[in-house]
Image: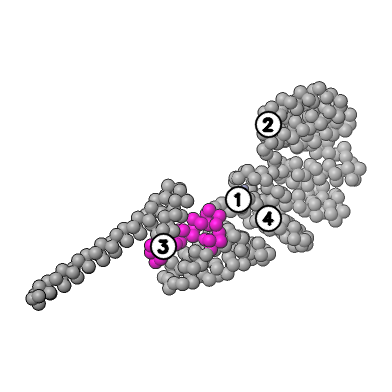
């Protein structure tokens, strides 16, 4: 063969090869882009499962696509797969040399994963590894506050809450008074009564109306110290300052007045509340109960009937009314009312349900254990 022909053939083969390689490369880039873009589109349309699938494909095709990894981890966290989310975000930090801003945003995602998994010591650790300027991000301050609270560092938690109020948090945050009271309730549950008492008193001093529920706890503490008079004073203040929580105070006041042999005073307590809020169901039920004890069944029934009109979904009025009728031997009447009531009832609510998610709130408090929203924020 002529050298010229050999050269021509070699050039042709090389050119063909180059074209094939270039095509494959651009094909791969297109696929990768499409998996990533499909992932983004699925996120926008709210289809998390599809988004996770596409982003997984995107990182398989290009392990250097950092943004796909970060988003994948966030989606896993939102779907409750916190362990996998932590793994994805942590691996990004371990292996790579990253620009400072990218590193910070990954650390923040990791902190959110860890908080979701309630690994609070690690939350503190990861936020501490952020540069100082990034730590004041309100989302991180919220996490840090919660982490200090969960690890029992209450003074630090309160300090973080103050920082948060200064810089306005990402969602609505309770006042300092409410937060102090919330912390005091946790401290009390842990058994430190002296510190809890100081916390509740501090909360009431900050804002006696917003933290009014603190009176309930202070009353309970006084009662456990056998100081019934002081307990009554606190519970009475709760009635005055937070009528929507009245049911909590009534039970306690009834028992306390009974203990000091002045049960009749309860009548005035109920009447006083009803003069201010005539539709207060627990007060109507309490008054009904008192009339029943005194043997005035008709008045007891009248009060209970009034309570059924305002009871909402609590069924407190009906319960009282039926009890009164049964005790009085008016069985047919009771059966009729029970029948009528059950026909249209759903056994949903009690007073102590979260206004945000509807879950039960458990012991009287300020923060929902299910959705972590604050219940006293207007
Ligand atoms: Zn809730």
Q: Secondary structure at mark 3?
A: helix
What residue is drawn where x is 82% and y is 50%? 231
Nearer the camera: disc 2 or disc 4? 2
Question: Closer to the camera, 79 or 29?
Answer: 29
First-in-chain label (1 vs 3) = 3
> Residue lying farthest bottom?
3
Q: Is mark 1 within 8 Å of ligand 1?
A: yes
Judging by the rendered image, the residue that carries numbered circle 3 is: 60
In screen coordinates, is 111 left or right of 205? left
First-in-chain label (2 vs 3) = 3
Q: Position of residue 65 (x, y in %)?
A: 39, 64
Q: Secondary structure at mark 2?
A: loop
Q: Secondary structure at mark 1?
A: loop
First-in-chain label (1 vs 4) = 4
Label disc, if present, on residue 182 of the rendered structure = 4
| CA distance for labels 2 and 1 | 26 Å
Q: Quadrant of the N terminus?
A: bottom left
Whether tag 1 and tag 3 are in contact, CB under 8 A, the answer is no
Q: Is residue 81 magenta?
A: yes
Q: Position of residue 199 (x, y in %)?
A: 72, 59
Using a 10 Å C-alpha cutoff, classify the residue at mark 1 as few (fewer than 14 neighbours), some (14 to 19) or many (20 or more).
Answer: few
| CA distance for labels 2 and 4 | 34 Å
What residue is drawn where x is 66% and y is 43%? 353
Q: Is residue 244 magenta?
A: no
Judging by the rendered image, the residue that carries numbered circle 2 is: 345
Nearer the camera: disc 1 or disc 3? 3
Label disc, if present, on residue 19 of the rendered structure = none
What residue is drawn where x is 38% and y is 64%? 62
Does residue 122 show up?
yes
Q: Secondary structure at mark 4?
A: helix
Q: Is residue 207 above or below residue 137?
A: above
């Amino acid at each position: 063969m002529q050298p010229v022909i050999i050269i021509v053939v070699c050039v042709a083969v090389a050119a063909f090869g180059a074209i094939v390689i270039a095509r494959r490369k651009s094909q791969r880039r297109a696929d990768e882009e499409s998996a990533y873009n499909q992932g983004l589109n699925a996120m926008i349309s709210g289809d998390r499962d599809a988004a996770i699938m596409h982003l997984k494909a995107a990182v398989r095709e290009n392990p250097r696509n950092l943004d796909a990894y970060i988003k994948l981890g966030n989606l896993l966290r939102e779907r409750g797969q916190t362990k996998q989310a932590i793994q994805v975000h942590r691996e990004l930090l371990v292996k790579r040399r990253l620009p400072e801003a990218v590193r910070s945003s990954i650390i923040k995602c990791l902190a959110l994963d860890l908080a979701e998994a309630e690994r609070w010591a690690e939350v503190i650790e990861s936020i501490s590894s952020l540069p100082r300027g990034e730590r004041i991000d309100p989302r991180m301050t919220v996490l840090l506050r919660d982490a200090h609270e969960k690890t029992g560092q209450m003074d630090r938690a309160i300090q973080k809450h103050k920082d948060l109020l200064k810089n306005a948090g990402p969602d609505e945050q309770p006042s300092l008074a409410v937060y102090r009271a919330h912390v005091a309730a946790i401290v009390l549950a842990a058994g430190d009564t002296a510190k809890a008492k100081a916390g509740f008193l501090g909360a009431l001093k900050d804002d006696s109306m917003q933290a009014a529920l603190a009176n309930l706890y202070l009353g309970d503490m006084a009662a456990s110290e056998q100081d019934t008079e002081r307990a009554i004073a606190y519970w009475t203040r709760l009635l005055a300052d937070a009528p929507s929580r009245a049911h909590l105070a009534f039970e306690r006041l009834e028992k306390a007045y009974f203990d000091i042999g002045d049960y009749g005073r309860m009548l005035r307590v109920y009447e006083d509340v009803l003069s201010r809020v005539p539709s207060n169901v627990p007060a109507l039920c309490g008054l009904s109960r008192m009339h029943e004890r005194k043997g005035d069944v008709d008045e007891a029934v009248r009060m209970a009937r009034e309570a059924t009109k305002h009871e909402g979904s609590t069924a407190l009025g009906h319960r009282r009314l039926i009890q009164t009728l049964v005790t009085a031997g008016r069985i047919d009447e009771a059966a009729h009312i029970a029948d009528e009531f059950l026909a249209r009832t759903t056994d949903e609510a009690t007073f102590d349900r979260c206004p945000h998610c509807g879950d039960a709130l458990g012991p009287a408090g300020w923060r929902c254990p299910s959705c972590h929203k604050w219940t006293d924020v207007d």
